[in-house]
Structures are given as structure tokens and as C-alpha cells.
Image (cartoon, helix red, strand yellow):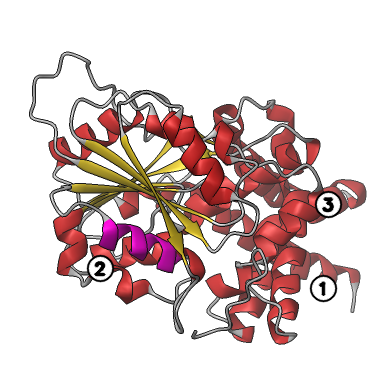
Amino acid sequence: MTAHAVFLVLAVLAWVSLGIWIVLLLGRGGFWRMNLQLPEAERDDAREWPAVTAVIPARDEARILPSTLPSVLAQDYPGPFTVIVVDDASTDGTGEVATELAAATPDRAEPRVLRGAGPPPGWAGKVAAMDLGVRESDKSSEYLLFTDSDISHPADSLRRLVRHAQDRRLDLVSLMARLSTDSPAERMIVPAFVYSFFQLYPPAWVNRPSSRTAAAAGGCMLVRREALDEVGGLVGIADARIDDVALGTLLKRSGGRVWLGVTTGVRSRRPYPRLADLWDMIARSAYTQLRYSPWLLLGTIVGLVLSYGVPPILGLVGLATHWWGVAIPALAAWAVMSASYIPVLRLYDLRWWRAPLLPGVMALYGAMTVDSARRHRRGRGGSWKGRVIEPGG
């Protein structure tokens, strides 16, 4: 192949990559904005506040509950509020810890601790625990708050969720909890995880009733009970491993109104101190997201290369060879990519210089996705605290 032919091939790749980023920037619902947050809820709001039940599935969470459960029990919510912790067949005393914490908190909420026996056939463990909490909850509760055991809430969290749901007549209000960025590995991986999630499920599209895009973030989901009952409860997502997206999809495609946003107040307290911990977290469900399809896996890898690999590699190659027809579009794509990443870095109080490093992080994501497929082929996909759920069951 002549030098001119190589130049043409590289120039086409560079322009294709720039085109991809222009489409993502302008035509993907502004996924990068990170500006959809709940409005404040005034304490003197005189509305009649509906009854709410919080359902917290917990499996082997005795160590983390003391840093999260008290924040849920102490919600400054004016209406009737009950908290149900579902101990999902734990072996570390999770139920006992939850009971002790409930006894030691102010009487703002009515706490209950249920002991689950594990999922029945065809159910994912977390969804089965959520379902048990729903079935055991007071039927007078107008809303259900599904929140994970590693999530802590500010005191006004429930008031803001309920107010937004009522004011906008929403069936599901969900917040992407702020994940931990205490360790170097978390600071590298977590913002890219949030960025990729919103790139896949742009909140502006999720929140638009006319759009088919649906999603939710499982750490914090407020659901109108009547809407959940109308779709037959959680049985419709019984075997879902990505239960939050599945629930958002189930409600929206039945005519429900859903809303997804970001927050800095609702936080995950689960630490991921090592890269290996984050790798396991992502590899556990990445191939599930691709519906276990080798073709979708191949398409994902090609997409990652064109979107994230081409800009820095061909940008530097173009500079080194003075092939400006390659360098200019590739560097422009890299600049657009980096600029779109800055808002999520700001959300996590991280410095701007991390933005140009996004291609390296996404290369790791590609490797994690391939590893996820490898694990599934070996029968170890979706492993979580001793459980492995195979595709379709």
C-alpha cells in the first residue's frame, strides 16, 4: 500500500470519528450536561404528603448498613413513612445489624426487618428481595422507595423525590447516586461509568414521554405503587440482572412517566479501593447489557475503537507525519470528546486534565466488556456474593 493510500485510509477514519463525536455532542440528547437535579422542597410546604414505604434489599451488608440505614430511617418526611429492610439470606448478621440500627434511631420512620429465603426459581436475588418487601408493605403506601443498602440519603431526600413525582405527575423518579471516588482507581473509572451510562440512556430522552428510551438508576428509585400494580408488580422483571433499567423500561412502555437525574446528595458508600474491584463490578453485567450477543460485543469494540481509539492515536500520528488531513479531524474529535467529559468531572469535583485521558479509560472498559463475555461463556457471568444467574433465568 502506498503512502498516499495509507493517508487516505487514516484520513477517512479520522473524519468518521469526528463525525461520530459531532453527532454525539449535538444529537444524543445532551447526555453530557449533568444538569438534571431535583428542585428543593420547602419545609413549609403545606401539601398532604402521601404514605411511602422504603424497601431496602440487603445481602451480606452488615459492614455497610451502619453508614447508610440511619440516613434512611431519619428522613425528615412529613407524611407516613415505613422502612422495610429485606435480609436476602445473608450469612454475616445483616438482619441483626439492621434490627439494632432500627431500634437506635429516632421515631421518624416505622422500621421492619424481613428475612428472605433467597430467590425462587426464575428470579434474580435482588428483584426477589424487592418483591418480598413490596408484598409485605402496607397497601396504603402511595409510593415505594427502592434504595440499595449501600446508599445514604440527605435528610430531605424523600421530600424532594415525592414532591417532584407529584408536581410532574411521574410514575418513577430515579437518581444516579454519587458513587465513591475516594481511591485513585475510583477517580479514574467511576466518572467514565456515569458518562457511559448517560451516553447510553440520555436523561433528556428517558424523561420525554414520546421517546422509547427508558432507564433508571437502581440506587434510588421512587415508584408510584398504582403504576407498579398496573404492570403486574415486579414479576415482569423477575429474572433481570440490570433491574433498574428493566423497571424503567417496564413502566415507560406501559404508558408510565419516568424521570432520571443526577445528584450529589444521595451517595453510595460502597468502596472500590482497587481496580480489580471495579473490574468485577463492571464485568459482572457488561455482557448482559449486550444481551449476550457476540455480534453486539463486536460492534461495541469497533465503536469504542472508532470513538475513543482513533482520535488520540491518529491525532498523534498525524502530527508526527505532518499529515494534517489526518491530524486536524482526529485532534478535533479528541477535543470534542474531552469537552463533553468535563461536566461529569465537575459533578465529581475532579480536575479538567482527566478529560483527555478518557480514551485510556475506555480502553479498559473495552477489556472489561470482553472479560464479561469470557466469564459468561465459562458459566461465571453475573456472579454476586456467591450467586450466579445464567442468561434467561
Amino acid of disc 3: Gly
Amino acid of disc 2: Gly
**Above or below for 123 versus 12:** below
The part of the chain drawn in magenta is 127-136
Residue 375: percent from left, percent from top: 73, 77
Precedes in sequence: disc 1 or disc 3: 1
Precedes in sequence: disc 3 or disc 2: 2
Precedes in sequence: disc 2 or disc 1: 1
Name the one closer to the observer, 263 or 104. 104
Question: Is residue 320 rendered magenta in the image?
Answer: no
Dot 2 alpha-carbon crowd within 10 angstroms: few under 14, some 14 to 19, many 20 or more = some
Name the side, left or right, on which 340 lies relative to 358: left
| Residue identified by numbered label 3 | 318
Amino acid of disc 1: Ala
Dot 3 alpha-carbon crowd within 10 angstroms: few under 14, some 14 to 19, many 20 or more = many
Q: Residue at x 72, y 37 (%)?
A: 187
CA–CA distance in space, label 3 to label 2:
56 Å
Q: Main secondary structure of the magenta part?
A: helix
Task: Tell me, for residue 233, which label it has, or none.
Answer: 2
Q: Residue at x 61, y 54 (%)?
A: 60
Q: Secondary structure at mark 1?
A: helix
Residue 389: percent from left, percent from top: 58, 78
| Residue identified by numbered label 1 | 5
Observer-side mark, 3 or 2, equals 2
CA–CA distance in space, label 2 to label 1:
59 Å
Residue 284: percent from left, percent from top: 65, 67
Name the one closer to the observer, 37 or 222. 222
Q: Secondary structure at mark 2?
A: helix
Q: Secondary structure at mark 3?
A: helix
**Which quadrant of the view contains residue 381?**
bottom right
Observer-side mark, 1 or 3, equals 3
